[in-house]
Image: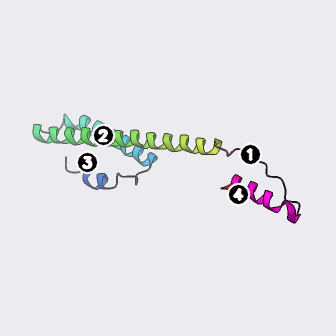
Amino acid sequence: MRTSEINTKSTSKRFNDQLSLNELRARLRRLDQLFKEFDQYGAALPEDASETEEFEAKYFETGAMYQSALVAFTVRSTTITNLTAFEASFKFPRSSIPRFDGKYTDWLNFEDLYLATVS
């Protein structure tokens, strides 16, 4: 059991946003593969219920941790995608400010309109 023992401590330290979606999926596949190997060879090994129970407990704990991280990653990705789509579709209303013709007498009206529109 020592060679196929699941090391959850070092992995859980890196869980907060450092593991990519692909790495999470790969680790989950590897975890399932380890459990199948353990189950296959477990029948040939001398029975030690405590080690078997310990391995199974670590398997389920780690599997649940990976599944939770996958769900969180998916929710986070969906939220970011939706937010980006919303930001891309948001546009300020068009406003038309007449072009200043350069006449000194029209400056105050133009300035008032410009400041009211921009401010």
Q: Which residue is mark 1?
A: 94
**Disc nearer the start of the sequence (1/4):** 1
Assess disc 4: are there few (<14), some (14-19) or many (≥20) residues with their C-alpha within 10 Å of its C-alpha.
few
Q: Which residue is mark 2?
A: 63
Q: Which residue is mark 4?
A: 115
Q: Which residue is mark 3?
A: 6
- Which element type, helix, strand or loop, lies under badge 4? helix
Locate residue 35: give its quadrant: top left
Residue 111 is inside the magenta segment: yes
Q: Nearer the viewer, residue 31 or 40?
A: 31
Locate residue 101: give its quadrant: bottom right
Residue 16's place in the image compared with 56, above or below, is: below
Assess disc 3: are there few (<14), some (14-19) or many (≥20) residues with their C-alpha within 10 Å of its C-alpha.
some
Q: Nearer the viewer, residue 105 or 66?
A: 105
Assess disc 1: are there few (<14), some (14-19) or many (≥20) residues with their C-alpha within 10 Å of its C-alpha.
few
**Disc nearer the start of the sequence (1/2):** 2
- Looking at the rendered image, the disc whose residue lies closer to the viewer, 2 or 3, is 2
Residue 27 is inside the magenta segment: no
Amino acid type of disc 2? Gly
**Disc nearer the start of the sequence (4/3):** 3
- Looking at the rendered image, the disc whose residue lies closer to the viewer, 1 or 3, is 1
Residue at 35% over, 39% down: 67
Amino acid type of disc 4? Leu
Instruction: Locate residue 94, reporting x and y percent.
Output: 74, 45
Please give the range of residues in magenta. Answer: 92-116
Residue 2's place in the image compared with 100, above or below, is: above
